[in-house]
Image (spheres, grey):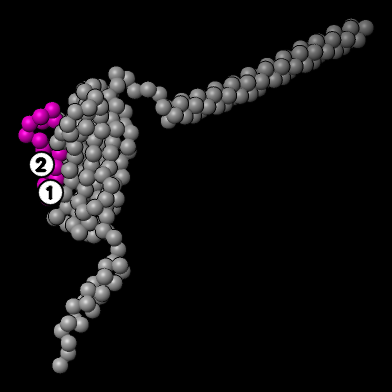
Amino acid sequence: MYDKSLTRPVLLLLGIQLTALWPTAAVEIYTSRVLEAVNGTDVRLKCTFSSFAPVGDTLTATWNFRPQDGGSEQFVFYYHGEPFEPMSGRFKNRVAWDGNPERNDVSILLWKLQFDDNGTYTCQVKNPPDVDGVIGEIRLSVVQTVRFSEIYFLALAIGSACALMVIIVIAVVLFQHFRKKRWADRAHKVVEIKSKEEERLNQGKKVSVYFEETD
């Protein structure tokens, strides 16, 4: 007959070992972190995640908002099997689901941006048993016009270089064309001069033959 008093410590030790071997359950969140958009336009707040556990019906995504000028946190959006839009508040009828949990995407759309939409938007995902992890943040700046970024300057530089190459190619083609035309004109003049000289020589021969016959 075995000693029951030894069973509990053995099971506890086995549980600790299994816990040490089991991967830590934590959801990783990925966002753009900083976003700039023009007043009155629509913007996509992108939030994707990675999880150790397979995505299922227990997945939840919660979006909240912290105003730039301070104040309490406000509810923006919630997803649990289906999207739940806010029934009241500043984001009522201004936010829509644009995610795909099967692709680890819980993004949303925010319509008709206003200047008081400036602030930090948080994205929290729970996928049991993965319920821990850092909350994703997007700092949104609503501006009158979008400032030129490095991408715009790069696009402008590439466009200018392409335009310059086109101009150079056109210039080379035109130069070759006018050069060939000039050589063709010169060759035509040379042929005309030779033709006139030959005609003059023929006329001179005819005159000399005439005088010989008259003599």
**Structural crowding at the residue carrying mark 1, measured as other residues with C-alpha within 10 Å and reported as few (<14), some (14–19) or many (≥20):** some
Q: Which residue is mark 1?
A: 80
Please state if 21 lies on the left or on the right of 198 as rendered.
Answer: left
Q: Which residue is mark 2?
A: 84
| Quarter of the image where one finds residue 209 | top right
Quadrant containing the N terminus in the rendered view: bottom left
Please state if 158 lies on the left or on the right of 207 as rendered.
Answer: left
In front of the other: 160 or 166: 160
Real-space CA distance between mark 1 and mark 2, rounded to the nearest whole angstrom: 8 Å
Amino acid type, label 2: Phe
Q: Which residues are magenta?
A: 77-92
In front of the other: 198 or 142: 142
User: Residue 120, how many percent across, how many down?
Assistant: 26, 33
- The answer to whether marks 1 and 2 mark residues whose Cβ atoms lie closer than 8 Å is yes
| Quarter of the image where one finds residue 73 | top left
User: Residue 57, how many percent across, how many down?
Assistant: 13, 55
